[in-house]
Image (tube, coloured by chain):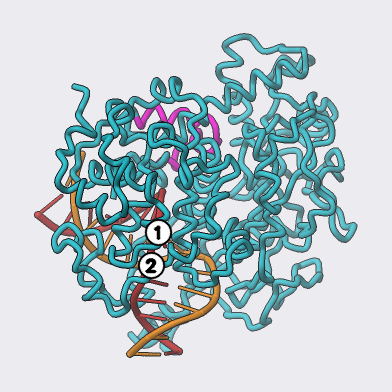
Chain colours: A cyan, B red, C orange
Amino acid sequence: MPQLQSPAGGGSGGGGAGGDDLGAPDELIPFQDEGDEQDKGAGGRGSAHGDLDELKSSLVNESENRSGSASGSDSEAERPTRQPRENFQKPRDSPAEAIRRQQDGSFFKGTPYPSYPFLMIPELGSPYLPNGALSPSGARTYLQVKWPLLDVPAGATLKDARSPSPAHLSNKVPVVQHPHHMHPLTPLITYSNDHFSPGSPPSHLSPEIDPKTGIPRPPHPSELSPYYPLSPGAIGQIPHPLGWLVPQQGQPVYSIPPGGFRHPYPALAMNASMSSLMSSRFSPHMVPPPAHGLHPSGIPHPTIVSPIVKQEPTQPSLSPEGNSKTPVIVKKEEEKKPHIKKPLNAFMLYMKEMRAKVVAECTLKESAAINQILGRRWHSLSREEQAKYYELARKERQLHSQLYPTWSARDNYGKKKKRKREKQPQQQIQETGNSVASKNKKPCVQYLSAEKSCDSPASSHGSMLDSPATPSTALASPAAPAATHSEQAQPLSLTTKPEARAQLSLHSASFLSSKAAASSSSLTSHQSSLLSRPLPFSSIAPTALLTTPPSFAAIPSPQAALAVLQAQPLSLVTKPTD
DNA sequence: GGTCCTTTGAAGGCC
DNA sequence: GGCCTTCAAAGGACC
């Protein structure tokens, strides 16, 4: 399957970047390494990052325009977050310094995503339960942040107006999966949007050089990361920073001991108890939590489902003899080992957020069907929108790797006891054509037919891909806002893989008969998916944008489209430009 | 109760 | 470096 080159990836070759790049301290700061990563990616990078840079620069410009101070030089504008990132990475500010910074109003920086005004607070301390599992929704508590001062266009909110706020999207009470059931910071997180209305970041919080010190101001937490609602070094001294983060129950939100931030995961804001908790609960050693289902503050959290706690011994339990462990014990300990789940990727984050919306819009409940819809919508998202999720996912991985530095995705292999499939559907299609689903235990269900009634408003941008006006416009880009720039930033990779070409062609056909394709029951799910899925922009050859075969215009059905495509020289569609 | 389905992306292993 | 596999979420369906 041709993939939209993900920011972290550029394929598996660069795939290591997602985690490997975490080692360097500099990489901990989001936006710089956006650029860095993109530079490293050198063409293999996904589209999202190009837009991230756009967003960065546009944000800087926007902030400067707003503030009117524009104190930064050009070079500063080009590297708006460099210094702040270093500050962020090494939060060694004294409390007084931190307070001063905050009083300067320089503590925050405008969000790099003007349209992304919520903070995804993964329980502040960690989105991951002590066992590594993510607290289903509480772990990713999207808080719409109220920016008190900065004037941001209403249209620049995270989602379109139709899209309920993420908090509202939670269609169920967050269920903590781990027996610990309690994130140390959850009581401090408001789960209500009442406190947070989409607003604007204050203009004086723009990323600028502090006029007093000449030192670049620390970046806004949202720039640092959605996970880092407050910058480490100074958080603790700020009872209510600008009042835009309101404690739910009146307790001090972020107090931090004068000693400062010593936790190995310094990006997290925490008070004394949190700090100790982090040290104890979120260290890789996973020592037991202090209490069952209770935050150290004693405040229970609604997400607590069961107070049963699996004690994770700090030291491996030894056999009575002393230091030798029987295989049984070893096995037991192995079983006791907390299951650290993989960090969610961008699409998973998107699904998590949008699932409830899709479920509400449709009558579908089957996740497979929902996921098909979401998959299509995902592709219909503009790259900026996708970039948000890529960024979130990247931070998830960062956070995860910091919380569990020794964790490897390999650790989870085999834990699902997943029955090994004989072959991937994709391969089956390539090899056996349409007779694919026969081997599957469960026949592929064409869920897309059920989606017909609800997939038209696919994206907040109107999803031209779901119901495109013309193939060419739809192909040009998923809501490509600046095609020319995109082409510059991300030279179109001339995907010459047969599958990719087929996808392109199929996709072209899908614009003309997507509904028919969706309702088709004679195609395999993957074929249907191909028909309905937009091709990643990066894999579309320029010529392809201009040479949509006119013969598609009269294709009555996806089957016919497929037949045409199979018979038609693909080179007509995706003739390489070289 | 376990697995499948379905989606995309990340990561690791293998060649 | 490319390909393949597994897992991440979700919940109904199926065995």
Query: Which residue appears farthest toward the top when viewing the image?
Result: A73
Mark 1 chain: A
Quadrant in the rendering for residue A248:
bottom right
Residue marked by disc 2: A446
Q: Is residue A344 visible?
A: no
Q: Position of residue A67 (x, y in %)?
A: 77, 18
Kindly check if marks 2 and 1 are in contact, taking CB atoms under 8 A apart as contact. Answer: yes
In the picture, the quarter occupied by the C terminus of chain A is top left
Query: Which amino acid lies under the numbered mark 1 shown in the image of this protein?
Result: Ala
The stretch in magenta equals: A20-41
Query: Which residue appears farthest toward the right when viewing the image?
Result: A250
A375 to A507, vertically: above or below: below
Query: Which amino acid lies under the numbered mark 2 shown in the image of this protein?
Result: Gln
Residue marked by disc 1: A518
Mark 2 chain: A
- The mark that comes first in sequence, 2 or 1, is 2
- Which mark is drawn over residue A357? none
User: Is A119 included in the stretch rendered in magenta?
Assistant: no
- Residue drawn at x 79%, y 49% is A254
User: Is A31 included in the stretch rendered in magenta?
Assistant: yes
Q: Nearer the viewer, residue A477 or A355?
A: A477
Q: Position of residue A327 (x, y in %)?
A: 33, 85
Label 2 and label 1: CA atoms lie apart by: 7 Å
Helix, strand or loop at disc 2? loop
Q: Position of residue A493 (x, y in %)?
A: 29, 31
Helix, strand or loop at disc 1? helix
Q: Image check: A3 left or right of A203?
A: left
Q: Image check: A360 left or right of A168?
A: left
Q: Image check: A164 left or right of A315?
A: right
